[in-house]
Structures are given as structure tokens and as C-alpha cells.
Image: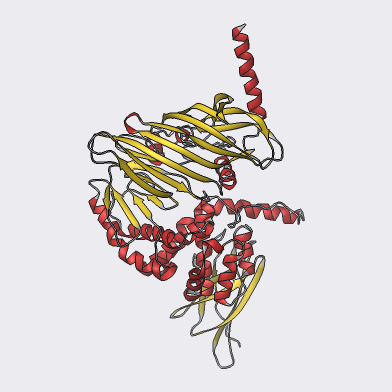
Amino acid sequence: MKFLCVLCVCCGASLVAAALEREAFTIAKYDLQITLEPAQQRLGARGKITLRNDSAQPQRIVALQLSSSLNWRSIRVDGKPVQYVSQPYISDIDHTGALSEAIVTLPVAIKPKDSVEVEIGYEGVIPLNATRLTRIGVPEEVAKHSSWDQISPSFTAVRGAGYVAWYPITTEAADFSEGNSLFEVADRWKKREQDSSMKLALGTSAGTDDASPMLLCNGTWMSADTGGGAPHYHWGTCEYGRFASVTPTFAMADYNHQDQSKTPLYLFSFPGHEAGAATYSSALDPAMRFVTGWFGTPSAPVAIADLADPHSPPFESGNLLMVSLAAEDSKLAGINVVHELVHSALPSSRPWVFEGLAHFAEAVYRQEQGGREAALDLLGLHRAAFLESEKEVSAALQKNAVQKITAQKSVGQPLIATFDETYYRSKAAYVWWMLRDMIGDDALKQAIGKYRAEDDKDPKYVQQLIESAAKRDLGWFFDDWVYQDRGLPDFRVQSVHPWKTEKDVQMITVTLENLGNAGAEVPFKILFEGGEFTKRIEVRAQATGTTRIELPGAPSEVVVNDGSVPESDLTNNEFTVPALIPER
């Protein structure tokens, strides 16, 4: 009989789990105290979260999720324990490839838009784990370089949801092997929690060693020690006013801290990486001058922290960049420092502004060092990140056009609303670069100089600043590239007509066609005997643009787009000019 009762409870829980709306609730506020025990790789947490019902129906059941290596210990409402069933839930939103899910029955149903405060306690270990990558065929050694999150005696660094669910989340399952499943789930979660706030008290026992480990996070940070000589406790508080595009992250290690007293940049490196740290220090002064000239004086604290594994890819979120300082690459150091200082100088709650401008700044800085081609090569590294997604958008728009669908659900990822990193970092960098090419450095600097995060409430705020500085209507551009996702342009040379005037002056008429659904002002180059000539022309979506140019020599080739405008097809950008046949 006892076995039968247990079986009934389990079956009931399974039915509830299958029927519940896992994304009905949003966690609007976190107030957590986190204790780290590096020697045991352990994390313990207690605190409160505020759940808001964002569904259209009253909800009494909520699914709270943590990394599968963590275990729920206590869930209470109004000081009283509530009923919950804990179960594993397969999802690649965590590095282990699974979550520890608590299906909680609240005392009363929560009405739409109402909230309830829940007291929670959980604990467990966070070792290095690359399961979600190895099970889709990534070699273990390669996977471990990417999934570097861990708590350990020598190095602790743990990124938030999307990497490690070390704080509670509420999501549907995400699967790396199913197309964009992981990114779609993560993007929905980020969008729901964009205005959520978090307050952390992070601490670890430092034993009897007077040398305390450096404890860092990517929010507003304060730290201190308690005790001295005797066993003492190293702790810190970390706050996030709102998540926006920030992934809450903490790190702890015996870092060397280089005092940059005249700047807001903090540099943390491992012993043995002094040469790499010196490279970053040397990059600071020129980066400060550049950023101040473009974006204003950096003032908010930002940090660059060393990664223990020199083969690990860097990670950047909010005011923290984690990158290996083992290498002594001055170019990389320069653009990394520029990126962080832009964040310091120009805060914004809009990801496409905050991150897009920082990546744009990297390219402009690279141009100052190595010329326009070097800058476009750097930008080109971003193109692949969103190219395939944009091809899918173009295909969907084409299908709608064929079926004559006019009233349709928005497709793609409009920059103004996206939480997809490939868009608000990579595509946004191109958008800022194209704006610069169209209106010039002085006008763009003027617009950026007037930007104030607290005033950025209207979606058209940035457009209005730029139009005011440029004295130019750019509504069509913002509609194609910021407010909507219309895919990418596709330029080709439709026709070229070389001719000579009665006074034997060489002329050429060029018509460019844009086969795509997004317009742009694109540069094109005409090669002629003895040199080349570059001009820009605006070509709207599904339209043509024609211009007439006087040349000092006979033209031989026309090449549209130097790489400054991302487009879907670069194979049709060259046109050989037929030789001019003399009139008889």
C-alpha cells in the first residue's frame, strides 16, 4: 500500500509537470546570500525571490529551476513551507545539460500581473562540466575550453543562466541539437527578465590566510573582509538594477591587482601573466584618449579579469571582461580595453546601443591603427554570426510577398527589441558603422555626445539625435535596420554605360540594384586606366540607384560594396565594363 501511495504521488507530479506553464511566472526580483566553499566546489544559497504571473490566467503551480548539480533544500511562502516535488529536467540552458526542477504548489493562485514573495534555500557543487557540448559530439578537450565555469580552490568563475543556472529560473526545455532551440528559449527568458533586479551577498571563508582572494562580479560591487589574523570571511555585495542584456557572473581567484588609479579600469591577472597584463596596461592611455574623443570620459568602474585556461574563449557581459592574459597581443589588448572603456563612458539599457557601440568602437579604433581595410576585416568577423539567420528572415519575407500576406507577425530580430547577442553585438556594430559612413564622424560624435541613458525612453530617441546632428531624414534606414528586421540587402551592378562627351571627356553611368528587403547607402568602386574612383549611392530595398560620373580614364571594372554594408550575397558584386567601341 505504501508503494502504491508513492507511485500515485509520482504519477500525479508527472501529470502536473506535463501540463504546467513553465514560462507563466517571471522572477522579477532576487535577493540572495551566496556562500562559496572552493575546497569542496560548493555553493550554498538562501534568500527571497519575487514571482510575477505574466500569463493571462491565475496560476498556482510554478516550476523553479536550478543547475542539476544543485539541490533544493527549502521553499517557503509567508514563513511556511510549501509543497513541492523535485525532479530532473533535461535542458541545455545549463552546462550540465539538465536542471533540478522544483514543481511548487503555492498556497493560493496568483492572478495575472500579481506577485508573490518566495523564500528559498539550495546548495550543491559547481565543477567543470561540458555535458551539453560533449553529447552533441564536441570533443571533450575542446568542450572544456568553452565550458570553463566552475568553483575550485585555484579558480572560480561562474556565468549565469545560459551557461550555469546558479540562481533560479523559469524556462521551457532548450536543446542544443535542435536548431536555434537554446537561443530561442534563452532569448524569451532574457526578454521576460530584462527589468528584473538582483541583490547578492557573496562570501567565502578565507581561513587563517591573511591574503584574501579577489571576489568579483559584473554588477555594482562592494567588498570587504571581516576578522583579521584569526579565521576570517571575505564577502561582497553585488547589485543589478535591471538585467537588460547582462548575464550575472562572479569570479574569485588569487589575482594580482594592478592599480589604475587615474582610470576606472581594474585589471586582475594571475601570477606568471605579468607580460600579458603589462600589454593591457600599455594599451590603456591611447584607448582612453580615443574613447574620450568619441564617447566622453569613462567614469563607471569596469574590469578585465584573467581566465585560468589560456585556451578558453573570452566572455564579456556588463562591466566585466574575462579573457586570458597569457598572450601578449597588443592589437587584441587595445580593442578589448576600448570596448570596456566605452561601457564605462556610455551606459545604456538598450543592448543594441550598449554593446553595439562598444563593438563599433573596436572597428573605428582598428581603423586608426591599421586603416579602413583592417577595420572592415574586423567587422567582417561579425557577419557570419547573423548571416544565416538573416537569410531565413529574407526567405520568410519572400514567402509572405509571394502569398501576398500584408498583415503578418513580425519576423526576425529587430535591433530595438532583440536579446540575441549575435544581433545586438554583431549586427548593431554594422549599423553604427553604416551610420558613420552616411553622416560622418563629426555628426555621429555630436549625436553620441548628447545621448543620455535616462532620456532613452522613446524607441526613436537615437534616430532623433542622429537626424538632428546630421540634418538628414534617416527614418527609412532605422525602419529597415533597427525597428524591423528585413533581412539583408543584396547588391549587384545592373548596368554600366561608358561614353564620351563631344569634348572627349570620359563618362560612365552606373545603375546598382538591391535585390534584398533592406536598403542602404553603399559604396562602389570604379577601376580605370591609372587608378580607381569610389562613390556612395543610396539604394532602397527592391529598388535601383543610378549615378553619372566623370573619369580621367577608360573604366574596366565596377565593384559594389567594400564590406562596410552586410549583405546576403557577395558573389555578384563585380562587373566587367565592356570596352567602349569607337563610333565610325
Question: Can you see residue 239?
Answer: yes
Depth order, front residue of 240/373 = 240
| Picture colour scheme | secondary structure
The x, y position of residue 87, in whole percent, is: 55, 24
Q: Which residue is depicted at the point 61% across and 61% down?
A: 459
Please state the total of marks drawn on the protein image. 0
Depth order, front residue of 483/395 = 483
Q: Which residue is depicted at the point 58% across and 84% down?
A: 499
Quadrant assignment for the C terminus: bottom right
Residue furthest toward the top? Answer: 1
Q: Which residue is depicted at the point 59% across and 9% down?
A: 3
Depth order, front residue of 158/510 = 158
Q: Which residue is depicted at the point 60% across and 36% down?
A: 172
The x, y position of residue 265, in whole percent, is: 34, 57
Position of 276 with respect to 520 (left or right) is left
Depth order, front residue of 256/177 = 256
The x, y position of residue 332, in whole percent, is: 35, 57
The x, y position of residue 504, in whole percent, is: 55, 91
Give residue 210's quadrant in the image: top left
Give residue 297's quadrant in the image: bottom left
Residue furthest toward the bottom? Answer: 503
Question: Can you see residue 314?
Answer: no
